[in-house]
Amino acid sequence: MNFNHQLLTGIVTIAVATWNPIALALSPAEVDAVAWQVSVLISPNLTQQGDAFLIEGEKTGSGVIVAREGNSYYVLTALHVVWKRGGFHAIAMPDGQVYYVDASENSPDIIPLGHPSGELGQTIAGLDLALLRVQSDRTYPLARTAPNPLQEGTPVFVNGWPNPDDLRQKIRDRQLVEGAIAEVTPASDDGGYRLLYSNPTRSGMSGGGIFNTNGELIGIHGRGRGVENNCSTPEVNAHNSCGMYIGEFLADSRVQSLQLSLNRNPIDPGMIQYGLTYTSQIDRINGSPVARSTPTPVIPPTLTPETPQPSPPPVAEFPTPSPEAIASAQTIYYVDPNQGTNAATAGITPENPFRSISYALQGARPGTVIYLAPGLYSARETFPLKLNPGVILIGNESQQGEGVIIRGGGIASTRTAGRQNYTLFAGNNSQILGVTLTNPHSNGTGIWIEDTTTAVIRNNTLMDNPREGILIGGTATPILEKNRFVNNGGNGISIIQQGAGEIRNNDFTNNGIGVAIAGMATPSIVDNHIRSNRNGIVVTASATPTLQGNILENNQNYGILTLGLAQSPLAENNLFRNNGISSQLTARIQDWGLDIPPRTVTSTVFGCVEYEGGLATFAYTGNGSIPLPFLNWNHTAAESGLNRCRLVTSSLNKIVALTGQDLSTMALSTGRIHNNNAVCLVDQSGGICQDSNLLFYLGGEEQRNPGEGLAPLLPFPWETTGNPAQQVETGAFIPLKDFAQRLKPESGLWFTD
């Protein structure tokens, strides 16, 4: 948590000797103690549980909890923070728990208090405010809303999570910044802005609370300093941020119609004491601000004074074994990488633990439970670690492995794929619960499972593995549930050969492929959230998975892609949203290139594919490649479009095969053949249109303006880098090097034949 002290040099700090309501000004630390308990972070990309994870490049916003009705909490934020429609908004509550709010059009969980105005929607009619309805059975405090009289010079605090200047950085540090009211104006026509204040706010703090020196919510921040903030005169705007007064919110007819139970009670000193004792569990998203080895404080239903507890003895905090676990375990070992000792006399008690997992595994037999203290398990470990049958490894299961980090890898022989580099092998009936696992090696896999029947992998985080988080091979049928798969270069999970089992309630984010399924695998994929990967699920070979109740959204290419001889998976009640090319595509690539001349070899084949009401020529470069749309025919009339798609696709296959060139050395070009403008596939280094490389003639208006003839052909993946067409003397020219680069094999499909 960062304080930014600027103006409050004369504020009186009081010592609370009784439990009467606060009537005097609080110190900045005391205001912060109140603010963190009622503030939330808002993002389109946070994980479902525990530690919150931000996607590289994403901006975030802030909000304040202002009301509760049953299990429905109401979060007040700036409307422009939740402007996006489609998908969801994720809300990280003060205790670190993450909830999702439906962001579809007309969502009942988003209540806007304004709407776009102006020809381009550049202004906001009404208030730049919105209420989010968040469902939770936990208890959180509510901000005290105080429509107090406002005067220039009054000290105020703004709370929120600023975005870093470099959005590749995923850490967010909460800040409470100090300042004073510079001007109070009538509510503006653009968003209802009324308060201007000297606090140095930044992007990401929009929607955060403006608090007075009593810790009361008096407004919502919305715009930073700058002459363009449109809140007052340019001179005032240049040096002041601006926000909306809470009184305007309380008087809004839509808010009054909800009849919300707002908090009008004075700040309870017990709340201040609690906030000073504990730290916000979402301070520093994706960082390490809090010693997560300490139990996450549950924000109490009523904030009453607590008797200070004595400091715990310097012993690592292990998970507490349940009576059932103690009764069923034949042996219990404890491991602490910071304070343990690898000795025969150690490991039996938390006070005298082993130092490494490797040492504990030497004596682990079926029924052994190994408890891991927080820390990094790496330098003293011998990788790969191998869990014998029936061994249970337990770290921080309640927070999906937060702080219990296993990092490393080693080469060992496997029955299913020869020598491989992996971190941990799960034996038959073993369990891995609550660890964060990373294999840093270039072809590294996190957990390897083969020929096991009931291995359980639950509440872990598999992240930054270059190949896959977990591989299931042979005839393995494990249960994988409530795990996070984040930033794995190949796949979150690979399932090969006759692998099966249950994959349920996991979260896959920012992987190459969320789940890749090959061979004759038959897994059950149920109730997972698969989002913001390059591809959601890829099914190849003869695999026949069952998919039910999954959410597949915001994946760059496909929600589900089926290749080879695989049948379209049995899919029920799955939700698809905002997948880049197609939510579900079946590409029969084995039928592509049948028109290639005999005795010719080509690295790229093309197919004409109808998908989701669209029509395109797709390109594919062989094993491990993901087919992508190359030319789009949706702009052409249905009959002529299909005919042109088939003819051009056939011509592409023949030209590439006969020239023997790689697509990366070629280009699309317009030129004249037989006195007509045409589109051709030419050598990038200077080829020209001629009969041997003709794809099709342009017609109608295209003849008069051939450069316009290429623009409608460019499908989705090209548009992400802008229009690649270059104007030359002979017409338009599009090098294919960048597109060919996108067709390179996915590292996650290393096992395809």
Image: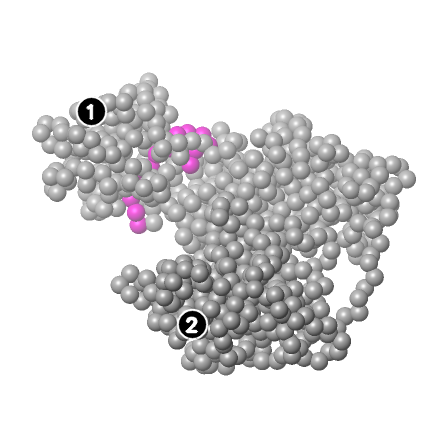
1 and 2 marks in contact (CB < 8 Å): no
x, y percentage for residue 430? 72, 43
First in residue order: circle 1 vs circle 2: 2
Which stretch appears magenta?
Answer: 613-626
Q: Kindly tell me whether residue 745 is visible in this rendering.
A: yes
Q: Secondary structure at mark 2?
A: loop
Label 1 element class: loop
Q: How many residues crowd mark 1 within 10 Å: few (<14), some (14–19), many (20+)?
A: many
Quarter holding residue 4: bottom right
List the residue tagged with mark 1: 688
Name which residue type carries label 1: Ile
Please tell me which residue lies in front, 11 or 536: 11
361 up-or-down from 310: above or below: above
Front one among 67 and 16: 16
Q: In the rendered image, which residue does mark 2 sit on?
A: 194
The answer to which of 389 and 276 lies nearer the viewer is 276
Q: Residue furthest right?
A: 345
Q: Is residue 136 left or right of residue 734?
A: right
**Residue density around tag 2, few if under 14, some if 14–19, many if 20 or more, within 10 Å:** many
Looking at the image, can residue 591 be seen? Answer: no
